[in-house]
Amino acid sequence: MKQTLQFIGLLTVSNTFMTIAWYGHLKHKNDWPLWMAIGISWLIALAEYIFQVPANRIGDEKFSLTQLKVTQECVTLSCVPDLRSSCFP
């Protein structure tokens, strides 16, 4: 149970960073040049990988690759609407 909670918790943090990396620059599209948006997005994506890699290693001890991917998609589908309503009104 502890591994499952760690896995899902790390995935949730990871997906929060990734959603911001993917869509956060749109909030500043008139303020930031493209090169700056790309650089900032990559820095945020780096933070995402810091959580994603351990999540997958922890999850791999208990779940199959298919189960890891399905869980990842479920977490993504739950994170995006929450972030959209709170960060991108």
Image: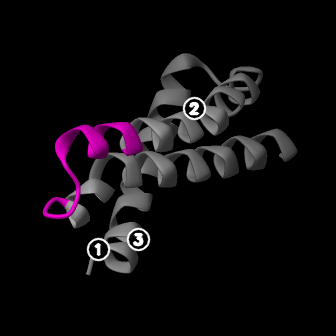
- N-terminal of the pair, mark 3 or mark 1, is 3
Is residue 18 rendered to the left or right of residue 46?
left
- The magenta region covers 29-40
The three-letter code of the residue at mark 3 reads Asp
Q: Position of residue 3 (x, y in %)?
A: 81, 39
Give the answer, above or below, for where 83 lies relative to 59: below
* Residue hosting label 1: 88
- N-terminal of the pair, mark 2 or mark 3, is 2
- N-terminal of the pair, mark 1 or mark 2, is 2
Q: Position of residue 32 (x, y in %)?
A: 23, 55
Q: Nearer the viewer, residue 22 or 61?
A: 22
Q: Nearer the viewer, mark 3 or mark 1?
A: 1
Q: Give the number of the disc on residue 49.
A: 2
The three-letter code of the residue at mark 2 reads Tyr
Give the answer, above or below, for where 74 lies relative to 60: below
Q: Position of residue 9 (x, y in %)?
A: 68, 52
Question: Mark 3 falls on what kind of element?
Answer: helix
Crowding at label 2, few (<14), some or many (≥20) Cα neighbours within 10 Å?
A: some
Q: Nearer the viewer, residue 53 or 68?
A: 53
Q: Residue at x 39, y 68 (%)?
A: 83
Contact between labelled residues 2 and 1, with CB atoms less than 8 Å apart: no
Location of the C terminus by quadrant is bottom left
Distance of label 2 from label 3 (alpha carbons):
21 Å
Question: Mark 2 falls on what kind of element?
Answer: helix
Q: Nearer the viewer, residue 77 or 86?
A: 86
Give the answer, above or below, for where 56 lies relative to 74: above
Distance of label 1 from label 2 (alpha carbons):
23 Å
